[in-house]
Amino acid sequence: MNILLLGSGGREHAFAWKISQSPRCTKLFIAPGNAGTARCGENVSISATDFAAIEKFVTENDIHLVAVGPEDPLVKGIYDYFIARPHLSSIPVIGPSQKGAMLEGSKDFAKQFMKKYHIPTAAYRTFDAANLPEGLRFIDEQTPPIVLKADGLAAGKGVLICATREEAKDALRDMIENAKFGSAGARVVIEQFLKGIEFSVFVLTDGKSYAILPTAKDYKRIGEGDTGLNTGGMGCISPVPFADAAIMRRVEDRIVRPTISGLQQEGIVYKGFLYIGLMNVAGDPYVIEYNCRMGDPETEVVFPRIKNDLVELLLAVAHEQIGSITLQTDERATATVIVASGGYPGDYAKGKVIHGLEHLALRSDTIVFHAGTKDENHHIVTNGGRVLAVTSYGKSIQEAVARSNEAIAHIHFEGMYYRRDIGYEFR
Ligand code: AMP
Ligand code: GLY
């Protein structure tokens, strides 16, 4: 079968790497892809949110399945776009409906959903221009730190953790009155600060049943020791050592099952990946956020630990048979270390030639996933803030991280930066 994958980051290279290993995949296309996905299939220069161009491509190239990497096409309703058109409606899109994607697209929607279905999450209230004065008074009643979240998609920047009430009030005014995050911040969720350790759980669901994928923990800050600005993620490990059987049972009973049955009760179609960001508060898991897709760089550690054929898993989602699948996972740990452009997450240069990748091509326990790269004049050059995700296997997290760090020593481009301390708390 012919498959179209949407997206262009490290996550999509990991999808493409896994899909291209499947005997069921005849031809894989990636729109728009990067220099790494080009080695797993054929890149097509179509934006992941250009539905009309995707429609034309799918029709002309006999595509049988569409897998969606990033949230944008899902939040914009690609699932519904296909369902609404008779010539597309039989082609499965792996990802939730537009309503389902609101679990990520609107923090307020996600909080209301969790409240209704008694899913553990931080206590909250939502404010907008109509009740801003009430919001300011509400802040006065809180004990800092105070967490403010722009309701809509804000490219991972919409969450502010304010150390004082004054800071929180300024931030609330900035979002609502001065449109700090554009329309995404016109409504703001203010919630209780949860103290604990974060980790992530990934669910692949057909809307009725589900499979829980390996856990992961990402490292969001730019600097070693978790310092400096937030990024999309500078590294990741799997499995999460403290997410033992007892915690995972609580996650399944209190969060995964009520979420899937809540979606059903709401009549929301959800056939795809659900990323649940959790806070482990003294052994009790709380939902920090839902994402309607896999994570990046989480995919780069989770997929290498899944032994099943990914195309079979995606087809099981399409055919509502995920309940009959047994997930087989690799016992080894994985770690990925992001190699970034100097300056990221602020301004950074593009077009720098990446040297040394050929030294890593034949390693059996290291995989170099491309995040922001492109082919230019027979060279692979940088094309984003996060450039590569270097994933390794190991008997332990420590061994996997050491392997990735050693591999990165063979790579060079001007201004490259990476964190050497991924997984530091598990050493
Ligand atoms: P999000 O964009 O929702 O993932 O939030 C970004 C980061 O803010 C999370 O990864 C957490 O580190 C932190 N965060 C969000 N909500 C809370 C909360 N209620 N309590 C403590 N930290 C939080
Ligand atoms: N690494 C965080 C995310 O994909 O949302």
Image (cartoon, rainbow, N blue to C red):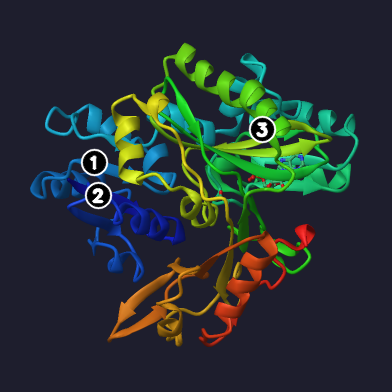
Residue 304: where, in percent of width, then height? 47, 55
Q: Looking at the image, is mark 1 or mark 3 earlier in the sequence? A: 1
The quadrant of the rendering that contains the C terminus is bottom right
Q: Looking at the image, is mark 2 or mark 1 earlier in the sequence? A: 2
In the image, which is nearer the foreground, mark 1 or mark 3?
3
Residue type at tag 2: Leu
Q: In this view, does 33 lie to the left or right of 401?
A: left
Residue 65 badge: 1
Q: Give the SS element for disc 2.
A: strand
Residue shown at 45%/56% (left/top)? 11
In the image, which is nearer the foreground, mark 2 or mark 3?
3
Proximity of marks 1 and 3: CB atoms separated by less than 8 Å: no
- Taking the image in four quarters, ligand 1 sits in the one at top right
Proximity of marks 2 and 1: CB atoms separated by less than 8 Å: yes
How packed is label 3: few (under 14 Cα within 10 Å), some, or many (20 or more)?
some
Tag 2 residue: 4
- Label 2 and label 1: CA atoms lie apart by 6 Å
Q: Give the SS element for disc 3.
A: helix
Residue type at tag 3: Met
How packed is label 2: few (under 14 Cα within 10 Å), some, or many (20 or more)?
many
